[in-house]
């Protein structure tokens, strides 16, 4: 009887130990299965994201082909051409893709402020008028000039190294042309709200580039053609939408007699070289967006920069 009494606690302890081992093994197995499932989902997500990015890259190549064909068959650029068509999301194998292109010379190039190493007073006046139309401080113009000019002389309304080195963290003014519109965020007075307000109307392109009168908005044309009223600018836009201007001579010829010698026409063109393409792609559960700046100075447009998300 005493032996049997001693065995009962031992058997109970063994049973509890066995249950603990089983519970531990079950927990370990569950953890391993969960981690394996998580790893598989991560691999699947990375695979889908890689495929979505490939679709986005394919969209950019499609845009280059469209622009190359347009250059081969046309001599002007206007909003009635295939490149100006926004393509809605269309099915692709395993996902979808869509996007569109924009003429960057429909906007005013901020780098026009400097020509041959000197400040272009005429283009500075264009920027001031554009800022005024957008209800932004005109003092932003000289601040931007100081940022991109190649000297350290401070305009009375501008800012050079002395100002930027006083910031935390400190940095110097660029003293060279802008390479991206977001560079403006480092310039005094150009907040994110200001840059967002400017974005539809200004571009950042290498060197000097004219505005395409066939694609520019009324606001941009109003800034370039200071002698024209808002009503006259609207009439130009209506005329070009009916029949795009063939060249600047055609543009002058279609102006009223009293306006044929207006200033600012030398800053216009009917042909564009720079375009941005924006593509959004989805593959499986992953999405990718890509933006690229294309330079159509060769038969096959060059890729100047590309951003992916």
Image: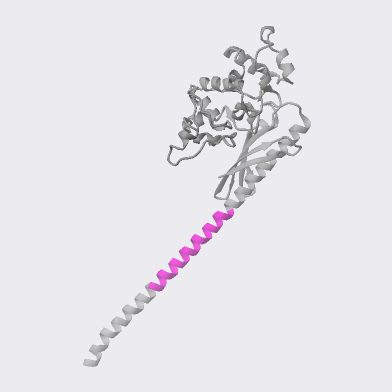
Q: Residue, x 60% and y 21% (percent of image)? A: 121
Task: Give residue 186's position: percent from left, percent from top.
Answer: 50, 36
Q: Position of residue 213 (x, y in %)?
A: 66, 22
Does residue 124 show up? yes
Looking at the image, which residue sits at the far right? 73
Q: How many marks?
A: 0
Residue at (32, 80) in percent of width and height: 15
Task: Name the main secondary structure of what is drawn in magenta.
Answer: helix
Q: What residue do we see at 56% from left, 23% from top?
A: 127
Q: Is 135 drawn above or below residue 98 in the view shown?
A: above
Front residue of 109/167: it is 167
Furthest-left residue in this view? 2
The C terminus appears in which quarter of the rendering? Answer: top right
Position of residue 64 relative to residue 143, above or below, is below
In magenta stretch: residue 27: yes
Question: Magenta part of the protein: which range?
Answer: 24-47
Q: Examine the image and state in which quarter residue 5 appears.
A: bottom left
Q: 173 or 199: which is nearer to us?
A: 173
The residue located at (63%, 18%) in the rendering is 237
- Quadrant housing the N terminus: bottom left
Colour basis: one colour
Question: Toward the viewer: 196 or 61?
Answer: 196
Q: Using the image, determine if residue 18 lies above or below residue 166.
A: below
Q: Taking 257 as reference, is 8 left or right? A: left
Query: Where residue 97 appears, x then y in whole percent?
Result: 62, 42
Is 34 in front, or is 230? Answer: 230
Does the stretch in magenta take in 63?
no
Q: Is residue 56 left or right of residue 172?
A: right
Q: Position of residue 227 (x, y in %)?
A: 61, 12
Q: Is residue 107 visible?
A: no
């Amino acid at each position: 009887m005493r032996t049997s009494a001693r065995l009962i606690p031992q058997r109970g302890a063994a049973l509890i130990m066995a249950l603990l081992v089983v519970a531990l093994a079950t927990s370990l197995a569950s953890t391993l299965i969960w981690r394996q499932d998580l790893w598989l989902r991560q691999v699947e997500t990375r695979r889908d994201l890689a495929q979505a990015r490939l679709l986005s890259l394919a969209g950019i190549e499609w845009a280059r082909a469209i622009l190359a064909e347009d250059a081969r068959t046309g001599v002007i650029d206007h909003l009635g051409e295939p490149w100006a068509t926004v393509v809605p999301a269309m099915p692709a194998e395993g996902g979808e893709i869509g996007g569109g292109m924009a003429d960057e010379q429909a906007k005013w190039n901020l780098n026009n402020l400097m020509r041959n190493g000197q400040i272009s007073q005429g283009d500075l006046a264009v920027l001031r008028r554009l800022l005024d139309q957008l209800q932004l401080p005109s003092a932003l113009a000289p601040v931007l000039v100081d940022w991109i000019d190649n000297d350290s002389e401070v305009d009375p309304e501008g800012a050079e190294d002395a100002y930027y080195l006083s910031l935390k963290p400190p940095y110097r003014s660029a003293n060279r042309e802008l390479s991206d519109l977001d560079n403006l965020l480092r310039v005094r007075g150009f907040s994110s709200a200001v840059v967002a307000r400017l974005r539809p109307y200004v571009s950042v392109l290498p060197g000097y580039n004219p505005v395409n009168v066939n694609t520019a908005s009324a606001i941009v044309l109003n800034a370039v053609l200071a002698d024209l009223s808002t009503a006259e600018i609207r009439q130009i836009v209506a005329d070009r939408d009916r029949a795009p201007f063939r060249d600047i001579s055609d543009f002058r010829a279609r102006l009223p007699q009293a306006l044929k010698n207006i200033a600012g026409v030398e800053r216009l063109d009917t042909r564009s070289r720079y375009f941005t393409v924006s593509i959004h792609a989805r593959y499986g559960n992953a999405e990718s967006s890509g933006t690229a700046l294309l330079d159509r100075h060769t038969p096959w447009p060059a890729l100047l920069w590309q951003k992916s998300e």
